Image (cartoon, helix red, strand yellow):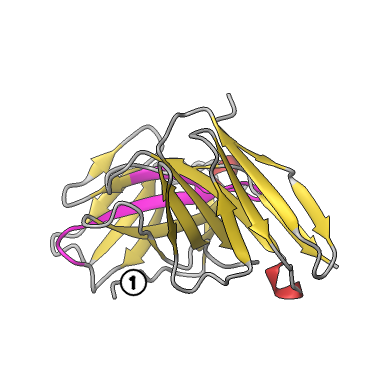
Amino acid sequence: DAKTTQPNSMESNEEEPVHLPCNHSTISGTDYIHWYRQLPSQGPEYVIHGLTSNVNNRMASLAIAEDRKSSTLILHRATLRDAAVYYCILKPRDSNYQLIWGAGTKLIIKP
Amino acid sequence: DAMVIQNPRYQVTQFGKPVTLSCSQTLNHNVMYWYQQKSSQAPKLLFHYYDKDFNNEADTPDNFQSRRPNTSFCFLDIRSPGLGDAAMYLCATSRRGPNEKLFFGSGTQLSVL
């Protein structure tokens, strides 16, 4: 079964870019890559997702390696409000419901 | 605007005493999920509904049941809570499809005494 691997934690300075890596070397060709984040005492919230091409939205950018075995979530200018656990998740194309969650990276933002 | 609402925010129950957690949504999504999240772990799917079709994960204990009386509401019943059932319970909704994102509620933190 495919799975994702993420660093346990990362630190970054406020107002600097943050690159959160995710390894998914066993990804299948039809798995979508999703990222969610979970702020303290909240439910997870959607950040971004993609299949093969890099993606940008108002929250972040997603860079997907050409072989799709890894991806990087990029926060362009981190603020204190971005301190959260970031989950890298695979969503199989042939399953409408299944999410394969990584263990998550706790992002610490230093003022 | 609250879209997925879970009540209560905190729930305390006694060992073996049945408890019900509730979830409502204003998104009119046809899929609803219940997740269990223990401390410092990723959420774990317990079951989901596609409309009224109920789908149980293979490793969800029989102690956990769910009801979805209509599109907007979903309930999680824990028939005989044990100490190991203390966790955050998260409700989520989505449209059907791998390209669809999930919307989560704020969760119910369950304590078992």
Q: Is residue A10 visible?
A: no
Mark 1 element type: loop
**Residue B54's spot in the image, x, y percent?**
44, 53
Vertical placement of A12 versus B32: above or below? below
Q: Read off the residue under disc 1.
A: A3
Query: Which of the pair B35/B17 is nearer the observer?
Result: B17
In magenta, the rendered stretch is A28-48
Query: Which of the pair A76/B106 is nearer the observer?
Result: B106
Vertical placement of A18 versus B44: above or below? above
Query: Which of the pair A8/A16 is nearer the observer?
Result: A8
Does residue A8 appear to the left or right of A32 in the view shown? right
Does residue A35 appear to the left or right of B43 in the view shown? left
Does residue B42 appear to the left or right of B38 in the view shown? left
**Residue B80's spot in the image, x, y percent?**
73, 68
Quadrant of the rendering where the N terminus of chain B is positioned: top right
* Residue ID at (48%, 34%): B71
Quadrant of the rendering where the C terminus of chain B is positioned: bottom right
Amino acid residing under circle 1:
Lys
* Residue ID at (52%, 48%): A44
Tell me the crowding category of disc 1: few under 14, some 14 to 19, or many 20 or more residues within 10 angstroms, Cα based: some
Q: Chain of mark 1?
A: A
Q: Is residue B90 visible?
A: yes
* Residue ID at (38%, 32%): A58
* Residue ID at (62%, 53%): B76
